Amino acid sequence: MAYADQEMSGNRVVAIIIVALIHIALGYLLITGLAVDAVKNVVERVTTIDVEEPPPPEPEDEPPPPPEDIPETAPPPPVAPPPPINIAPAPPPIRTQTNIPPPAPPALRIPPPAPPAPPPPPSLARAASPDNFQRWGARIQNDYPSSALRREEQGTVSMRITIGANGRVEACAVTGSSGSSALDQAACRGMQRYARYNPALNDAGNPVSSTTNQSIRYVLPE
């Protein structure tokens, strides 16, 4: 660095001396009255030297200051780490759903009431009834058993009879005895032989079988 400065100073001194000599020569020629041509020739021969000044040197880095004696200090007391903080996870996002109103129910159409059904036809059902009871009842009573007459037996026989669709007695059973077996048997036998009934009818008016009760009273002739 010092060598470069010395070289630069020598160049400047040489340049300054050359310029001084030129000025002295010019002054001398002017004073002595030399011709202008001589001055011009001398001036043209003079070589202009442009001295470029080098840039100023960069300042050297200053050495760091010597370390000062740092007094020894006691190490800081140990610090307990802070307790862990439980951070609850963020709740899941709540998804809201727009409630779409249900479609309007279809209009309720009530059909007109059905016309009332026609009333059913009147029922033709009826129970069986004796047909000319006095006539065939007298015939049964007059058919008095001879054994009962000899023993002078008399009384009333109650019976449960079955009447067919033709109006005739199809079956007979004694439900109340007269006290004489001869009269009981004669009563059932006479009912099946002589009795006539108007048969029972169903709702449509058709004759059907049915059951009924019948009594025959036996009285001794005077």
Image (cartoon, rainbow, N blue to C red):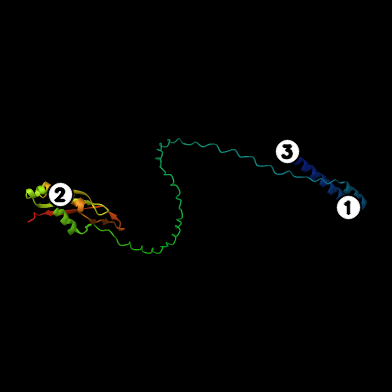
Residue receiving disc 3: 4
Dot 2 alpha-carbon crowd within 10 angstroms: few under 14, some 14 to 19, many 20 or more: some
* Of the two numbered discs 3 and 1 in the rendering, the one whose residue sits closer to the viewer: 3
In the drawing, what numbered circle is on residue 30?
1
Query: Gap between marks 3 and 1, in whole Å?
Result: 40 Å
Label 3 or label 1, whichever comes before in sequence order: 3
Q: Position of residue 26 (x, y in %)?
A: 86, 50
Q: Examine the image and state in which quarter residue 134 appears.
A: bottom left
Residue at x 88%, y 52% (from the top left corner): 30
Q: Position of residue 125 (x, y in %)?
A: 27, 58
In the drawing, what numbered circle is on residue 61?
none
* Of the two numbered discs 1 and 2 in the rendering, the one whose residue sits closer to the viewer: 2
Secondary structure of residue under mark 3: helix
Q: Between residues 125 and 216, which one lies in front from this camera angle?
A: 216
Q: Amino acid at mark 3?
A: Ala
Q: Vertically, is 184 above or below 109? A: above
Query: Gap between marks 3 and 2, in whole Å?
Result: 183 Å
Residue receiving disc 2: 186
Q: Amino acid at mark 2?
A: Ala
Dot 3 alpha-carbon crowd within 10 angstroms: few under 14, some 14 to 19, many 20 or more: few
Is residue 10 at all visible to an observer of this figure?
Answer: yes
